[in-house]
Image: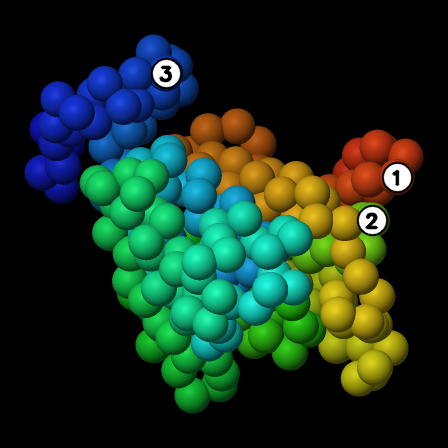
Amino acid sequence: MSEDGTVLSPDEVARYARHLVLPEVGGPGQRKLKAARVLVVGAGGLGAPLIAYLAAAGVGTIGIVDEDTVALSNLQRQIIHGTGDLGRRKVDSAADAVAALNPHVAVERHAMRLDIDNAEHLLSAYDVIADGSDNFATRFLVADVAERLEKPLVTAAVGRFDGSLTTLRPFERDEEGVLQPSYRCLFPEPPPEGLVPACAEAGILGALTGVLGTLQALEVLKAILGIGEPLVGRLLLVDALSFRFETIRYRRRRP
């Protein structure tokens, strides 16, 4: 039993056996996962594999924010939803998929658009935030509120054949005592409306969202477990056509 009283049932011990033999995870780490609360913003291309892998890993509570319903054009990449889910709310479809995958995981459904009026209330209830939204307005809002609430944020984005991923902890200091960079250190302001085409206009290779969403899940799990080197101050760039992975460093902007 952990300090918070979290215990693993015999079924969970068997289910997570491949985690439990990892020295970096083991029983204490698996109990951390079970006690964790993660908010996923968006149950679309990135959110689908992200939610699935968090659930499979045994993250105890997953909150899902999404106001949309499942459309036929979603199914090319949003693999947590199926043909039988057409017209359903994505939070409901995703919750059913999680229940089928791992009954030990609780899903909190937020069938709404995250906006300036509800963002702080929603984010404050979770330990780690994972942003898989598809627009800059939501990304900036999530990043600003997560920074204010001192919540770790793992954020990813995709377009056509490329994607990016980073982890933000701008409320912490590095080894030199300098605050870690924020989202606005990467992107000071949202681009002008219409400059970056949406997925519906530009298109996207469906499997790419699976790659970035899975990498995003890995970063969230590392954050919960406190293992490895997170992508703090580093932006991972993925070029699917050349299969090139590059990491660039970025620092806190001077005031």
Looking at the picture, tell me which residue is in the foreground, 38 or 67.
67
Q: Is residue 227 above or below residue 102?
A: above
Looking at the picture, tell me which residue is in the foreground, 33 or 108.
108
Asked whether, in this view, residue 241 is left or right of residue 233, the answer is: right
In the structure shown, which secondary structural element does the residue marked by tag 1 occupy?
loop
Residue pointed to by mark 3: 18
Amino acid type at circle 3 is Arg
Q: Position of residue 231 (x, y in %)?
A: 63, 41
Amino acid type at circle 1 is Leu
Q: Residues within 10 Å of mark 1 (few under 14, many from 20)?
A: few
Looking at the picture, tell me which residue is in the foreground, 67 or 187.
67
Q: Image point 13% across, 22% down: which residue?
A: 10
Q: Image point 39% across, 60% down: which residue?
A: 93
Q: Position of residue 155 (x, y in %)?
A: 60, 55
Looking at the picture, tell me which residue is in the foreground, 2 or 122.
122
Q: Image point 59% across, 46% down: which residue?
A: 213
Mark closest to the chain's N terminus, 1 or 3 = 3
Q: CA distance from mark 2 to mark 1?
A: 6 Å
Q: CA distance from mark 1 to mark 3?
A: 33 Å
Q: Position of residue 167 (x, y in %)?
A: 59, 49
Amino acid type at circle 2 is Phe
Give the mark toward the camera: 3 or 2: 2
Q: Position of residue 5 (x, y in %)?
A: 9, 38
Q: Are marks 3 and 2 in contact (CB under 8 Å)?
A: no
